[in-house]
Amino acid sequence: MREKIVAGNWKMNNTLEEGVQLAKEVNEILKKNAPKCTVILGTPFIHLADVVRTVDSKLVKVSAENCADKEKGAFTGEVSAAMVKSTGAQYVILGHSERRAYYHETDEILKEKVNLALANGLKVIFCIGEVLEQREAGKQNDVVKAQIENALFHLSADDFAKIVLAYEPVWAIGTGKTATSAQAEEIHAFIRSIVAKKYGQKVADDTTILYGGSCKASNAKELFAQPDVDGGLIGGASLKAADFYGIIEAFN
Ligand code: PEP
């Protein structure tokens, strides 16, 4: 049975105090209502160490939202994978469409980040997904295939097992427009099939593939019920503990 995951992505929201408070609230809810999936909080760098100290690590795992594509040194303002790991965080989100679009992160850069994250003992939540014009042109499968091949398919099967994939159609992120459960299932099944071709059916069956894009309590149950949708990467709805728990609860 592959791991089911609900992961939040706070993006650039919350002061340190607000973030610690939110983590505390999520932790309290989960203490009373044991989750039936792995729960991850993806937070800005400044929150990581405090959030790790705030939550019960058996209930909540912690993820960075990015890391540098360089190991260490004169890269002012950057945060390395080793630094992320030293906070106690266990995951890093890489390849988010906002990083690709606004910070020009290419497949080559992402490949370096993936390598450094894995070399430093982090698991990777790797985001892929097409923009609206690509979907309208029917190119979504080609787009996600290239994103996966270019940044991940150099990995050994052992290393690939440390990757969680997150399919996030860019047209659905923060827009209120969710992919239908049928659209999500179709492309998740396709993604699993290309993993199977490269690494074999067992690795593909064990790969967790999350859906992201305007996922909320009202649509999570139907999305997560699809055979190839193993949970969600949640932006806006991860900023309030009750909303986030509403999605976690979809697995109950
Ligand atoms: C995201 O940014 O990863 C995301 C899924 O955002 P939202 O849930 O707000 O669409």
Image (spheres, grey):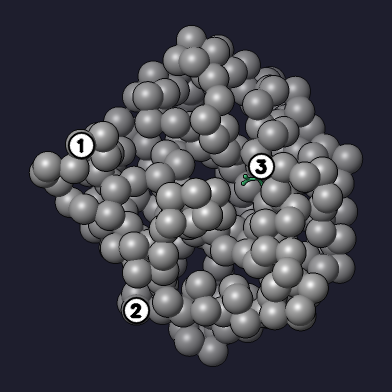
Q: Is residue 102 above or below residue 157?
A: above
Disc 3 C-beta below 8 A from ligand 1: yes
Q: Locate the C terminus and report the quarter of the image it occupies.
A: top right
Question: Where is mark 3, residue-wise?
Answer: 234
Q: Is residue 32 above or below residue 59?
A: above
Disc 1 C-beta below 8 A from ligand 1: no
Q: Is residue 136 left or right of residue 21?
A: right
**Could you tell me which secondary element the residue under label 1 belongs to?**
loop
Residue, x 49% and y 49% (percent of image)?
102
Residue 58 in sight here: no
Q: What x and y, as percent, mark residue 77?
A: 26, 34
Disc 2 C-beta below 8 A from ligand 1: no
Which quadrant of the structure image shows residue 156? Answer: bottom left
Question: How many neighbours does mark 3 have within 10 angstroms: few (below 14), some (14-19), or many (20 or more)?
Answer: many
Q: In the rendered structure, which amino acid carries the disc numbered 2?
A: His
Residue, x 83% and y 50% (percent of image)?
177
Question: How many neighbours does mark 2 have within 10 angstroms: few (below 14), some (14-19), or many (20 or more)?
Answer: few
Question: Where is mark 2, residue-wise?
Answer: 154
Residue 176 in sight here: yes
Residue, x 34% and y 79% (percent of image)?
154
Q: Is residue 70 left or right of residue 1?
A: left
Give the camera-side residue of 128 and 232.
Answer: 128
Q: CA distance from mark 2 to mark 3?
A: 28 Å
